[in-house]
């Protein structure tokens, strides 16, 4: 698809969360939670320092229904996903790309954007995080971010000329 201008590459280090506190086993009679547990990502804390914990309150999760296992699995997945910075790419494209949906994975390849691991020449699936359509100018602005376990978890800065293609 046709890209306009120069894409920008950034690292979302401001969105790191390496501690999660989960409340569950809600008791209707006391209107309080009977269980709570805090999970931490030690590697992330060592690298980035401890951040304020994200707090979740689940009235529907009960220990007698394997709630402890569910809470543990959910917390570990979130800590793996949120415990490190994620690379993101922002660019403008022509209106013919407007059928790309938020949450969709698109294949991005470009010879001057960082590739997985090290070096230049990206060719990866990246998730669309936001899309703005400007009907007046006939363009769309996209923000793509590594939200899955794609391997790019450290910053790589490189010159960023035009993205040669975004394949839907």
Image: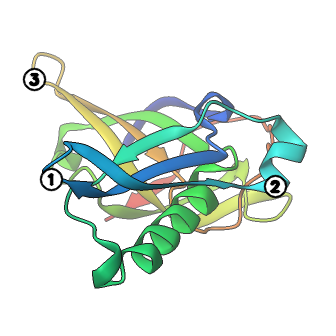
* Residue highlighted by disc 3: 135
Q: Earlier in the sequence, mark 3 or mark 2?
A: 2
Q: Comparing marks 3 and 2, which lies closer to the viewer?
A: 2
Query: Mark 3: which secondary structure?
Result: loop
Q: Position of residue 166 (x, y in %)?
A: 41, 56
Q: Residue drawn at (37%, 64%), measured in percent from left and top? A: 105
Q: Nearer the viewer, mark 2 or mark 1?
A: 2
- The residue at 40%/75% (across/down) is 70
Examine the rendered structure and indicate whether residue 95 appears above or below residue 64. above
Give the structural element (helix, strand or loop) at label 1. loop
Q: Is residue 86 visible?
A: no
Viewed as shown, does residue 94 lie left or right of 84?
left
Q: Are marks 3 and 1 in contact (CB under 8 Å)?
A: no
Outermost residue, front direction?
29
Task: Estimate the x, y position of residue 87 in percent, counting from the top left.
Answer: 63, 45
Colouring convention used in this rendered image of the protein: rainbow
What is the crowding at mark 2: few (fewer than 14 residues within 10 Å), some, or many (at least 20)?
some
Q: Which residue is mark 1?
A: 99
Q: Residue 91 in the image: state x and y as whole percent.
A: 45, 34
Q: Looking at the picture, tell me which residue is in the foreground, 145 or 20.
A: 20
| Between 134 and 14, the one nearer to me in the picture | 14
Q: Is residue 153 left or right of residue 90?
A: right
Q: Residue at x 46, y 79 (%)?
A: 69
Q: Nearest the camera: 66 or 153?
A: 66
The answer to whether the residues at label 3 and label 2 have Cβ atoms under 8 Å apart is no
Query: Crowding at label 1, few (<14), some or many (≥20) Cα neighbours within 10 Å?
Result: few
For residue 131, the mark is none
First in residue order: circle 2 vs circle 1: 2
Residue 42, which numbered label? 2
Percent across and percent down for residue 145 are 50, 48
Residue farthest along the top direction in this orientation: 136
């Amino acid at each position: 698809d046709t890209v306009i201008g120069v894409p920008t590459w950034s690292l979302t280090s401001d969105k790191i969360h390496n501690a999660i506190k989960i409340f569950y086993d809600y008791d209707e009679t006391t209107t309080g939670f009977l269980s709570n547990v805090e999970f931490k990502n030690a590697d992330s804390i060592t690298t980035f320092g401890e951040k304020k914990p994200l707090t979740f309150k689940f009235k529907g999760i009960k220990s007698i229904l394997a709630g402890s296992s569910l809470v543990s699995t959910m917390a570990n997945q979130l800590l793996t996903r949120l415990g490190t910075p994620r690379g993101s790419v922002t660019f403008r494209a022509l209106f013919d790309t407007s059928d790309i949906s938020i949450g969709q994975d698109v294949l991005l390849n470009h010879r001057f954007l960082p590739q997985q691991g090290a070096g230049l020449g990206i060719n990866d699936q990246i998730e669309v995080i936001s899309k703005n359509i400007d009907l007046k100018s006939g363009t769309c602005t996209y923000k793509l971010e590594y939200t899955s376990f794609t391997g790019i978890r450290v910053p790589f800065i490189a010159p960023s000329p035009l993205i040669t293609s975004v394949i839907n």
